[in-house]
Image (cartoon, grey):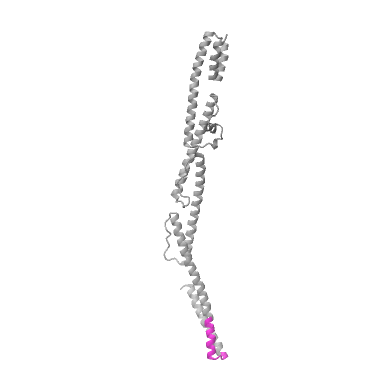
Amino acid sequence: MRRSEIHAAESVECLNRALNRLKDIWEEIGIPEDQRLQRTDVVRKHIKGLLDMMIAEEDSLRKRLMSSIESCRKELDVLCTELQLSPFEEDEGRTMLQLEKDIRSRLEVIMKQKSQRVKELKRLSKQDRELCDIMCSVPFCIDMDMVPSLEQLDSYRSYLNDLTKEKDRRHGEFVGIKRRIIVCMEELDQLPDTSFERDVVCEDEEAFCLSGDNITALRLLLGQLEDRKTENELVCNSYRSKIQELWERLQVLQEEREGMSDHMLSFGFFYCRVYLLVVPFWP
């Protein structure tokens, strides 16, 4: 027998003893039967009112538990659907209090999972926007109004990791090509002409858009400059050969040749060209 049942039996026994004691008192006093009935009715009403009040309170608790269980069930079902989780399975034989506690605990766990996923999605989206600004790329396709699944978050993270590696690769390529472009322009005595060339040479490296088109344009620009540089070197070599021939014809001393050779190496194409224009008019 449960302890509560023992206490209930003791309460009934206590009530019977109290009624018997009242009966003895009334008997000793000599209270008439009709008054005894009235007093007994007062006792009954008092006890009944107290028990009815206690029953109402406990029944209200039962109803609140039932309402809480139903509300938590609905919220739990919605969350399980949003997070693409298996429905919550209730253990058989659980009391209302145990069931309400189980469902509420499970609800708190899933709400925390939802909060973590939404927070992670916002973090990844912020990183995605920053990379898109740098690389002029299209954001990852994901519904920001829905709670993402774990698989979607994993895919998003993997995509951003690959995009970050590509950004670093392009930035490294950009820095390397930029340096070669600057060297070529200095050797060609050329200043940045177009807006793209000024962006490459003059602007901050971190501000350059690392789009695929820009990287392709960079390679093309470098190729054009290197072709021009190669062409100038071929022309310079041709001019140097002609200058050598002129030195031979004019019988220029070796000391003078060495001094002018230094100038030709320093100033290159334009010096050789001017030299060829001037030398024929020497006296």
Q: Residue at x 48, y 63 (%)?
A: 101
- The count of marks equals 0
Residue 102 visible to an observer of this rendering? no
Closer to us: 84 or 125: 125
Magenta extent:
28-45
Can residue 226 be seen here? The reply is yes
User: Magenta includes 241?
Assistant: no
Residue 42 location (% of width, % of height): 54, 84
Q: Image point 53% across, 80% down: which residue?
A: 47
Q: For the C terminus, which image quadrant?
A: top right
The relative height of residue 110 versus residue 140 in the rendered view (above or below) is below
The residue depicted at 50 percent of the width and 74 percent of the height is 56
In which quarter of the view is residue 46 placed? bottom right
Please say whether residue 35 is one of the residues in the magenta stretch. yes
Residue 179 at what x, y percent from top left? Answer: 53, 30
Image coords of residue 65 (percent x, y): 48, 67
Question: What secondary structure predominates along the stretch shown in magenta?
Answer: helix
Q: Residue at x 50, y 79 (%)?
A: 12
Camera-side residue of 42 and 79: 79
Between residues 126 and 16, which one lies in front from this camera angle? 126
Say if 62 sits above or below 108 in the image: below
Q: Position of residue 19 (x, y in %)?
A: 53, 84
From this view, report whether residue 49 is shown above or below residue 253. Answer: below
Q: Is residue 262 above or below residue 129?
A: above
